[in-house]
């Protein structure tokens, strides 16, 4: 391989930043990605995505060596950027199932739907051990226990990749993320600084990566965050000495979205530092109207090699790792998609597995006087709260759009699931604002967080909103028993809402299959979910180093009928 061909393999360009599709051939590009809001032109459906992936692949196969392209995407709870796919509960809900076998099934469905659109690389699973719920990515982690997260990491990697990358023609490359300690930053600040000893780093944050490497994960995404003031993209000790040498990781490391730009104002110096630290592939989203695009990266890295500040052996190591994974995946032999996978996308069989994930993820926190399960033949059931009929809120962030727009996809809301579950003789009244609640035999109130993703989801205060508290109080004042369902990406400070409610269910962010919530409410399925993290009693208990007094609910808590 020429130096140009090698460096091209180290470059991953966002679709929206690709100047010209001919550049895939001209610069020997090894990868393209679609970031949170980067989508093909035309209607958002599986066929459009497949056509795009095939078109981009055709340019890679025109190069001298015909090295196939690998397309990457954030499939973090199903193939969540594509309309019509199966959207699963976010990872915090999957963690509440405490069922690795089910998680493996869920990620296998995701892999098949991703592969069905011609994409063979999922930026997941997130295997952060999350300490502070104020972090806006809390819902992307499986929980706060290294043991639980490690179990789920193994299950997710196997679900995406199979027992090995070469075991099946439709395997999708997993990317464990975000290495390392992204869930331990001070005050839960996204892309922040984790301050701790190496002993704590190894005890709390490293075990899931050890487990993922042992399970054969083919790629690992390096975090924006820092450890004791040093950015992960610059930390040779953690990237090379620990991950590659000590843990024996043989896949490749990919940066996060323009992450190396944060190292210093000098982009060329950032490239030198991060390549020498051990990064193998670089996610480059910037377009032609901004600096630090892929043409500049290629030029600068070539100059660094010529100047002797980046060794040819480091380049060879990076490219060998990338090509090894592509070869193991069978991309050289067959870079195209099996059409039968496209036909499976969003199928009833796939949605049934997602529904089971919802059923097992619900955590029953309170059930006074056996308020649940509800009878299906109630004369009059009132459902209160705008989130009850909102796929957007039900799915949360990373759904169709980066910050969340689930209403634009196909699925069943909680309200629709309730209507399907009850007797034909039961009157179901829906009141988004809680007005005109009369003659109810029972009331279901659905409240929770509006959609958000990284950064925008960081909060200093996790109190349930005053509007949600008032909605529950209004329902209670009617005199009927009240069941509250909380949709959230993390535990919220419940205040009086828990006491006011007769029954209280933590439903997390369940995805498109709202029937799974109704299945538990009406007793078709017994609740088995257990908390994947402690539930704080107040905001003062959020920071791990400030924990005082008992939490409201312990890790592993969950009632049943």
Image: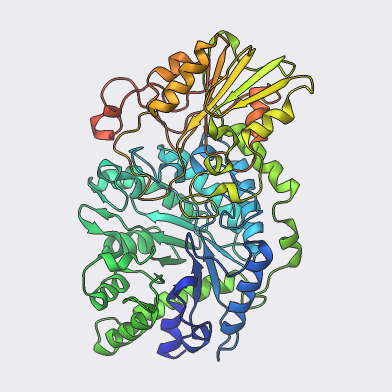
Query: Measured along the vertical axis of the image, is residue 472 above or below residue 359?
Result: above
Colour scheme: rainbow
Q: At which x and y percent is residue 179?
A: 37, 55
Left/right placement of residue 412 relative to residue 545 reads right
Quadrant of residue 339 within the rendered picture? bottom right
Whether residue 328 is visible, yes or no, is yes
Q: Residue at x 58, y 86 (%)?
A: 66
Query: Measured along the vertical axis of the image, is residue 506 above or below residue 208?
Result: above
Q: At which x and y percent is residue 91?
A: 50, 43
Q: At which x and y percent is residue 125?
A: 49, 52
Q: Residue at x 50, y 74 (%)?
A: 31
317 or 135: nearer the viewer: 135
Quadrant of residue 4 within the rendered picture? bottom left
Left/right placement of residue 272 relative to residue 247 reads left
292 or 528: nearer the viewer: 292
- In the rendered image, the residue lying farthest to the front is 436
Q: At which x and y percent is residue 478?
A: 54, 11
Whether residue 167 is visible, yes or no, is no
Left/right placement of residue 203 relative to residue 9 reads left
Q: Residue at x 52, y 52 (%)?
A: 76
126 or 440: nearer the viewer: 440
């Amino acid at each position: 391989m020429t130096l140009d061909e090698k460096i091209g393999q180290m470059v991953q360009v966002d679709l929206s930043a690709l100047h010209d599709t001919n550049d895939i051939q001209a610069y020997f590009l090894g990868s393209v990605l679609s970031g949170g809001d980067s989508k093909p032109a035309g209607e958002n459906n599986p066929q459009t995505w497949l056509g795009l992936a095939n078109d981009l692949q055709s340019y890679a196969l025109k190069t001298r060596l015909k090295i196939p392209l690998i397309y990457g995407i954030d499939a973090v709870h199903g193939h969540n950027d594509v309309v019509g796919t199966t959207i699963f509960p976010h990872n915090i809900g999957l963690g509440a199932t405490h069922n690795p076998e089910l998680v493996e099934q869920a990620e296998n469905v995701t892999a098949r739907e991703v592969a069905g659109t011609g994409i063979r690389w999922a930026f997941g699973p997130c295997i952060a051990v999350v300490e502070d719920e104020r972090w806006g990515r809390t819902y992307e982690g499986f929980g706060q226990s290294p043991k639980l997260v490690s179990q789920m990491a193994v299950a997710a990697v196997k679900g995406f990749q199979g027992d090995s990358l070469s075991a099946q023609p439709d395997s999708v490359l997993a990317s464990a993320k975000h290495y390392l300690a992204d869930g331990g930053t001070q005050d839960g600040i996204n892309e922040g600084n984790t301050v701790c000893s190496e002993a704590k780093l190894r005890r709390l944050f490293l075990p899931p990566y050890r487990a993922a490497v042992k399970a054969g994960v083919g790629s690992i995404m390096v975090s924006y965050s820092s450890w004791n003031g040093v950015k992960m993209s610059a930390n040779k000790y953690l990237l090379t000495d620990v991950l590659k040498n000590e843990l024996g990781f043989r896949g490749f490391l990919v940066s996060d979205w323009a992450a190396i730009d944060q190292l210093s104002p000098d982009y060329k110096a950032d490239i030198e530092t991060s390549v020498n630290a051990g990064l193998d592939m670089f996610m480059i989203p910037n377009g032609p109207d901004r600096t630090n695009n892929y043409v500049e990266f290629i030029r600068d890295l070539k100059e660094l090699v010529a100047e002797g500040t980046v060794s040819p052996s480091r380049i060879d190591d990076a490219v060998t790792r990338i090509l090894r994974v592509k070869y193991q995946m069978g991309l050289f032999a067959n870079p195209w998609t099996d059409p039968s996978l496209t036909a499976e996308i969003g199928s009833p069989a796939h949605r049934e597995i997602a529904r089971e994930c919802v059923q097992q993820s619900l955590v029953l926190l309170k059930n006074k006087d056996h308020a649940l399960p509800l009878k299906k033949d109630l004369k009059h059931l009132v459902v209160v709260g705008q989130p009850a009929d909102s796929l957007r809120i039900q799915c949360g962030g990373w759904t169709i759009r980066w910050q969340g727009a689930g209403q634009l996809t196909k699925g069943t809301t909680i309200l629709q699931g309730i209507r399907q579950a009850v007797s034909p003789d039961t009157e179901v009244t829906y009141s988004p604002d809680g007005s005109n609640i009369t003659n109810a035999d029972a009331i279901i109130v659905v409240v929770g967080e509006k959609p958000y993703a990284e950064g925008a989801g960081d909060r200093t205060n996790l109190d349930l909103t005053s509007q949600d508290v008032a909605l529950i109080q209004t329902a209670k004042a009617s005199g009927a028993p009240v069941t509250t369902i909380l949709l959230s990406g993390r535990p919220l400070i419940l205040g009086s809402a828990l006491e006011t409610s007769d029954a209280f269910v933590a439903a997390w962010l369940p995805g498109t299959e709202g029937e799974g919530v109704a299945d538990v409410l009406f007793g078709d399925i017994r609740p088995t979910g257990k908390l994947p993290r402690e539930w704080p009693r107040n905001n003062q208990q959020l920071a791990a180093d400030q924990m005082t007094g008992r939490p409201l609910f312990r890790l592993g808590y969950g009632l049943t009928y």
